Image: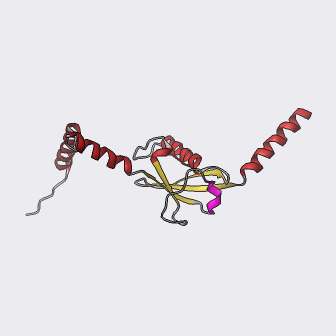
Protein backbone atom coordinates (compact mmCIF):
# COMPACT_ATOMS: atom_id res chain seq x y z
CA UNK A 1 0.00 0.00 0.00
CA UNK A 2 2.82 2.38 0.85
CA UNK A 3 4.52 1.67 -2.48
CA UNK A 4 1.30 2.39 -4.38
CA UNK A 5 0.96 5.84 -2.77
CA UNK A 6 4.54 6.78 -3.72
CA UNK A 7 3.98 5.82 -7.35
CA UNK A 8 0.74 7.77 -7.46
CA UNK A 9 2.44 10.82 -5.97
CA UNK A 10 5.20 10.70 -8.61
CA UNK A 11 2.61 10.62 -11.40
CA UNK A 12 0.92 13.71 -10.01
CA UNK A 13 4.24 15.57 -9.88
CA UNK A 14 5.06 14.83 -13.52
CA UNK A 15 1.64 16.06 -14.66
CA UNK A 16 1.97 19.33 -12.76
CA UNK A 17 5.45 19.94 -14.19
CA UNK A 18 4.22 19.69 -17.78
CA UNK A 19 1.13 21.78 -17.12
CA UNK A 20 -2.40 21.52 -18.36
CA UNK A 21 -3.43 19.50 -21.36
CA UNK A 22 -4.69 21.36 -24.42
CA UNK A 23 -6.37 20.28 -27.64
CA UNK A 24 -4.22 21.23 -30.63
CA UNK A 25 -5.33 21.42 -34.24
CA UNK A 26 -2.56 21.12 -36.87
CA UNK A 27 -3.35 21.75 -40.53
CA UNK A 28 -0.97 20.39 -43.16
CA UNK A 29 -0.37 22.31 -46.36
CA UNK A 30 -1.99 20.36 -49.19
CA UNK A 31 -3.93 17.95 -46.96
CA UNK A 32 -7.69 17.54 -46.64
CA UNK A 33 -8.11 18.70 -43.07
CA UNK A 34 -6.41 19.27 -39.73
CA UNK A 35 -5.29 16.68 -37.23
CA UNK A 36 -6.37 17.15 -33.63
CA UNK A 37 -4.62 15.71 -30.61
CA UNK A 38 -3.98 16.48 -26.96
CA UNK A 39 -0.64 17.90 -25.80
CA UNK A 40 0.70 19.44 -22.64
CA UNK A 41 1.28 23.19 -22.42
CA UNK A 42 4.92 22.55 -21.51
CA UNK A 43 5.65 20.40 -24.58
CA UNK A 44 8.18 21.79 -27.01
CA UNK A 45 7.13 22.74 -30.53
CA UNK A 46 9.54 20.06 -31.85
CA UNK A 47 7.67 17.37 -29.89
CA UNK A 48 4.33 18.64 -31.19
CA UNK A 49 5.62 18.53 -34.79
CA UNK A 50 6.88 14.98 -34.24
CA UNK A 51 3.53 13.88 -32.78
CA UNK A 52 1.61 15.54 -35.61
CA UNK A 53 3.76 13.79 -38.24
CA UNK A 54 3.24 10.43 -36.56
CA UNK A 55 -0.54 10.94 -36.42
CA UNK A 56 -0.53 12.05 -40.06
CA UNK A 57 1.35 8.93 -41.15
CA UNK A 58 -0.78 6.64 -38.98
CA UNK A 59 -3.94 7.93 -40.67
CA UNK A 60 -2.43 7.34 -44.12
CA UNK A 61 -3.03 10.86 -45.36
CA UNK A 62 -1.81 12.31 -48.60
CA UNK A 63 0.54 13.83 -49.66
CA UNK A 64 3.09 11.57 -48.00
CA UNK A 65 5.42 13.55 -45.74
CA UNK A 66 8.72 12.70 -44.10
CA UNK A 67 9.19 11.98 -40.42
CA UNK A 68 12.03 14.37 -39.53
CA UNK A 69 10.72 17.44 -37.72
CA UNK A 70 13.72 19.46 -38.94
CA UNK A 71 12.30 19.39 -42.48
CA UNK A 72 9.17 21.31 -41.47
CA UNK A 73 8.15 24.80 -40.43
CA UNK A 74 5.46 25.28 -37.79
CA UNK A 75 3.32 28.40 -38.04
CA UNK A 76 0.65 29.95 -35.88
CA UNK A 77 -1.60 32.29 -37.90
CA UNK A 78 -2.69 34.11 -34.75
CA UNK A 79 0.87 34.98 -33.65
CA UNK A 80 2.43 36.21 -36.87
CA UNK A 81 3.99 35.26 -40.20
CA UNK A 82 7.24 33.91 -38.72
CA UNK A 83 7.79 30.20 -38.11
CA UNK A 84 7.86 29.15 -34.48
CA UNK A 85 11.07 28.09 -32.81
CA UNK A 86 11.19 24.34 -32.16
CA UNK A 87 12.52 24.93 -28.65
CA UNK A 88 9.71 27.03 -27.19
CA UNK A 89 6.76 25.69 -25.23
CA UNK A 90 3.56 25.24 -27.20
CA UNK A 91 1.40 26.63 -24.40
CA UNK A 92 3.32 29.90 -24.19
CA UNK A 93 1.67 31.12 -27.41
CA UNK A 94 -1.90 30.99 -26.15
CA UNK A 95 -3.08 29.59 -29.48
CA UNK A 96 -4.51 26.19 -30.39
CA UNK A 97 -4.56 26.22 -34.22
CA UNK A 98 -1.34 25.73 -36.16
CA UNK A 99 -0.08 25.13 -39.69
CA UNK A 100 2.70 22.72 -40.70
CA UNK A 101 4.60 23.23 -43.98
CA UNK A 102 7.66 21.65 -45.54
CA UNK A 103 10.78 23.80 -45.73
CA UNK A 104 11.14 25.13 -49.30
CA UNK A 105 14.88 25.78 -49.00
CA UNK A 106 15.83 22.15 -49.59
CA UNK A 107 14.20 22.08 -53.02
CA UNK A 108 15.93 25.28 -54.08
CA UNK A 109 19.32 23.93 -52.99
CA UNK A 110 18.75 20.74 -55.01
CA UNK A 111 17.85 22.74 -58.13
CA UNK A 112 20.96 24.91 -57.79
CA UNK A 113 23.16 21.84 -57.31
CA UNK A 114 21.67 20.15 -60.39
CA UNK A 115 22.19 23.26 -62.53
CA UNK A 116 25.78 23.56 -61.33
CA UNK A 117 26.53 19.93 -62.15
CA UNK A 118 25.33 20.41 -65.74
CA UNK A 119 22.36 18.05 -65.53
CA UNK A 120 18.90 19.07 -66.57
CA UNK A 121 16.43 20.04 -63.87
CA UNK A 122 14.02 17.27 -64.97
CA UNK A 123 15.26 13.71 -64.58
CA UNK A 124 14.47 11.29 -67.38
CA UNK A 125 12.21 9.18 -65.19
CA UNK A 126 10.29 12.24 -64.04
CA UNK A 127 9.76 13.35 -67.63
CA UNK A 128 8.47 9.91 -68.54
CA UNK A 129 6.10 9.90 -65.62
CA UNK A 130 4.74 13.29 -66.59
CA UNK A 131 4.18 12.26 -70.21
CA UNK A 132 2.59 9.00 -69.07
CA UNK A 133 0.27 10.89 -66.73
CA UNK A 134 -0.66 13.29 -69.51
CA UNK A 135 -1.39 10.36 -71.82
CA UNK A 136 -3.56 8.65 -69.18
CA UNK A 137 -5.46 11.85 -68.46
CA UNK A 138 -6.00 12.49 -72.15
CA UNK A 139 -7.15 8.93 -72.88
CA UNK A 140 -9.55 8.75 -69.95
CA UNK A 141 -11.09 12.17 -70.38
CA UNK A 142 -14.67 11.86 -71.49
CA UNK A 143 -15.32 14.02 -74.46
CA UNK A 144 -18.94 14.29 -75.51
CA UNK A 145 -19.38 15.80 -78.90
CA UNK A 146 -22.61 17.49 -79.82
CA UNK A 147 -23.99 17.68 -83.34
* Residue 57, placed above or below residue 90: above
Q: Residue 7, can we see it?
A: yes
Task: Report the residue at 33% width, 46% height from top.
Answer: 109
Q: Residue pushed farthest front?
A: 116
Give residue 41's position: percent from left, percent from top: 67, 54
Nearer the observer, 84 or 77? 84
Q: Which residues are magenta?
A: 88-93
Q: Residue furthest left?
A: 147
What secondary structure is the stretch in magenta mostly built from? Answer: helix
Query: Above or below — where is 78 with respect to 58?
Result: below
Specify the farthest residue to the right.
2
Quadrant of the drawing holding the N terminus: top right
- Look at the picture and state if 26 lies above or below 64: below
**In terms of depth relative to the viewer, which is nearer, 1 or 99?**
99
Q: Position of residue 2 (x, y in %)?
A: 92, 34
Task: State the count of labels.
Answer: 0
Quarter of the image with the C terminus in it? bottom left
Residue 144 occupies quadrant: bottom left
Residue drawn at x 61%, y 61% is: 93
Task: Determine the residue positioned at 22% across, 37% down.
Answer: 125
Verify whether residue 128 appears in magenta: no
Q: Say if residue 1 shows up in the picture.
A: no
How are the colours assigned in the image?
A: secondary structure
Residue at 59% from the left image edge and 46% from the top image edge: 47
Query: Measured from the top left, where is residue 75 in percent x and y?
Result: 50, 58
Query: Is residue 92 a member of the stretch shown in magenta?
Result: yes
Picture coordinates of residue 73, whole percent (x, y): 47, 53
Q: Going by the image, does 146 lie left or right of 56? A: left
Amino acid sequence: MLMYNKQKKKKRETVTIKGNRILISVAFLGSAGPIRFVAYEGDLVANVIDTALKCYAREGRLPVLGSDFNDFLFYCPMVGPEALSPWEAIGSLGARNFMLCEKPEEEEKKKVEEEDSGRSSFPINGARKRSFRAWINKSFSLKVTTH
